[in-house]
Image (spheres, grey):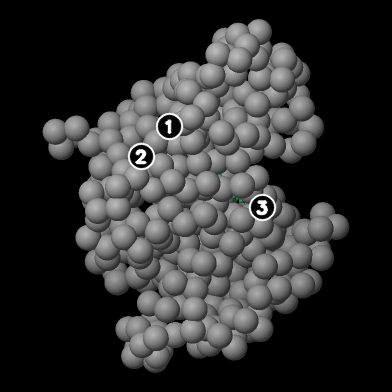
């Protein structure tokens, strides 16, 4: 089956996904009967490419790696991203623009436009899930298209697909986790006696923290993840502003570094639950006993515990993720859309090879 793909945003994640698509080309064709063809790439400043005959991905990756533009600045300024989405022949739109943690825009509008145009959507941008998940899910159901977003929390580690595919008829009662790599890296360094500012500079040097790290340090990124999980797991209609939030500013290395001798460790913990029908969430630094699995996740790794009514507590650990893991989330979402289309059209065997 040939599926055409369009990208709104083609930065780090998009380009890594492009490399993974090339690497997995044979397995996608031979095992999943999937031939992916790119027909649209939109960026903000690096240009736009659109071609119904297919875009040469090797060429695009090479051009972007030498910082060449995809189209001239004049061509780019004349193109409207919403028209490009609507008019594209893409079967699937990938929304990969940067997160706006205070509004979830313009990503939500990109996704809405794609769904209204009858296209399946895959995103790694947590803004739309943290702010407008219910609306987008319902719209996608009305238009009978798939809306996938595995990469928005814990990269390619299955969180949402785990619950939807592998835990049918289960209820998620609560969850807790350590989900922000920048703050976890900083806290790990502070435990070694490194000051907050020096730990932050190191995170920035290693490319773990953004130039403006306040969204991580002040807990906004974590709050967006909590909101996204409440919306998806518990059908809440929350946004990150409604998540109680305390960041890690103000913690001192002198206190943090002494705690392990007393059997404790500080982590920036994300929590969510439903109480008497009301979903709520919080992000806050907590002193955890060393026997707690959340206390034993160092550096850029993440962990999530979900409490279910059927399987009790499940714990998922992601070990030092890199860009490849986020790209893999997009690939796994792509394959699940291919499977969905195959099932709808009665094309696939009932028991495919794993
Ligand atoms: N990086 C990670 O490890 C990671 C992990 C999980 C989730 N995510 C999420 O994945 C998304 C993409 O991340 P990234 O690291 O690839 O970001 P990035 O490198 O900054 O790339 C963003 C892309 O979006 C384009 N863009 C920005 N605004 C746009 C607009 N209004 N219309 C069209 N294109 C626009 C940019 O164009 P220009 O190049 O011209 O600026 C660029 O191509 C983000 O939402 C991020 O939160 C990232």
- Residue at 48 percent of width and 23 percent of height: 289
Q: Quadrant of residue 9?
A: bottom right
Where residue 49 sits: x, y (%)?
66, 68
Where residue 259 sits: x, y (%)?
58, 14
Circle nearer the N terminus (1, 3): 1
Does the residue at mark 1 contact the one at mark 2 (Cβ under 8 Å)?
yes
Where residue 199 sits: x, y (%)?
72, 22
| Residue to which mark 3 is pinned | 323
Q: CA distance from mark 1 to mark 2?
A: 8 Å
Label 1, residues with CA under 10 Å away: few <14, some 14-19, many ≥20: many
- Residue at 44 percent of width and 85 percent of height: 352
Where residue 76 sits: x, y (%)?
66, 58
Q: Nearer the viewer, mark 1 or mark 3?
A: 1
What SS does tag 1 mark?
strand
Q: Quadrant of residue 114?
A: bottom left
Above or below, comparing residue 124 to residue 226 in the picture: below
Residue 337 left/right relative to 203: left
| Residue to which mark 2 is pinned | 175
| Mark 3 CB near ligand 1 (8 Å cut) | yes
Circle nearer the N terminus (1, 2): 2
Residue 228 left/right relative to 215: left
| Residue to which mark 1 is pinned | 270
Residue 194 left/right relative to 347: right
Q: Nearer the viewer, mark 3 or mark 2?
A: 2
Above or below, comparing residue 87 to residue 94 in the picture: below
- Residue at 35 percent of width and 83 percent of height: 343
| Mark 1 CB near ligand 1 (8 Å cut) | no
- Residue at 57 percent of width and 24 percent of height: 217
């Amino acid at each position: 089956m040939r599926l055409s793909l369009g990208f709104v945003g083609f930065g780090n994640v998009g380009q890594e996904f492009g490399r993974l698509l090339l690497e997995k080309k044979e397995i996608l064709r031979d095992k999943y009967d999937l031939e992916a063809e790119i027909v649209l790439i939109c960026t903000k400043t690096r240009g736009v490419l659109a071609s119904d005959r297919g875009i040469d991905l090797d060429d695009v990756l090479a051009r972007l790696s030498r910082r060449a533009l995809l189209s001239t600045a004049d061509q780019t300024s004349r193109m409207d991203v919403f028209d490009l989405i609507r008019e594209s022949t893409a079967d699937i739109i990938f929304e990969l623009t940067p997160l706006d943690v205070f509004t979830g825009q313009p990503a939500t509008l990109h996704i809405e436009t794609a769904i209204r145009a009858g296209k399946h959507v895959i995103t790694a941008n947590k803004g739309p899930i943290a702010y407008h998940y219910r609306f987008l899910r319902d719209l996608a159901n009305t238009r009978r298209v798939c809306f996938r977003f595995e990469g928005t929390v814990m990269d390619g580690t299955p969180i949402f697909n785990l619950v939807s595919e592998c835990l049918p008829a289960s209820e998620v009662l609560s969850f807790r986790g350590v989900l922000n790599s920048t703050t976890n890296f900083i806290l790990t360094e502070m435990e070694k006696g490194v000051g907050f500012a020096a730990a932050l500079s190191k995170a920035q040097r290693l490319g773990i923290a953004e130039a403006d790290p306040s969204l991580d340090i002040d807990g906004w990124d974590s709050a967006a993840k909590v909101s996204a999980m409440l919306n998806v797991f518990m059908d809440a209609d929350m946004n990150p502003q409604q998540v109680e939030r305390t960041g890690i500013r103000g913690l001192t290395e002198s206190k943090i570094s002494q705690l392990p001798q007393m059997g404790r460790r500080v982590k920036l913990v994300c929590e969510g639950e439903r109480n008497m029908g009301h979903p709520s969430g919080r992000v806050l630094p907590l002193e955890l006993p060393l026997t707690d699995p959340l206390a034993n996740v160092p550096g850029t790794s993440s962990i999530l515990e979900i409490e279910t009514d059927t399987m009790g507590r499940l714990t998922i650990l992601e070990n030092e993720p890199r860009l490849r893991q986020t790209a893999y989330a997009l690939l796994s979402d792509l394959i699940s859309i291919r499977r969905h289309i195959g099932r709808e059209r009665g094309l696939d065997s009932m028991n495919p090879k794993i």
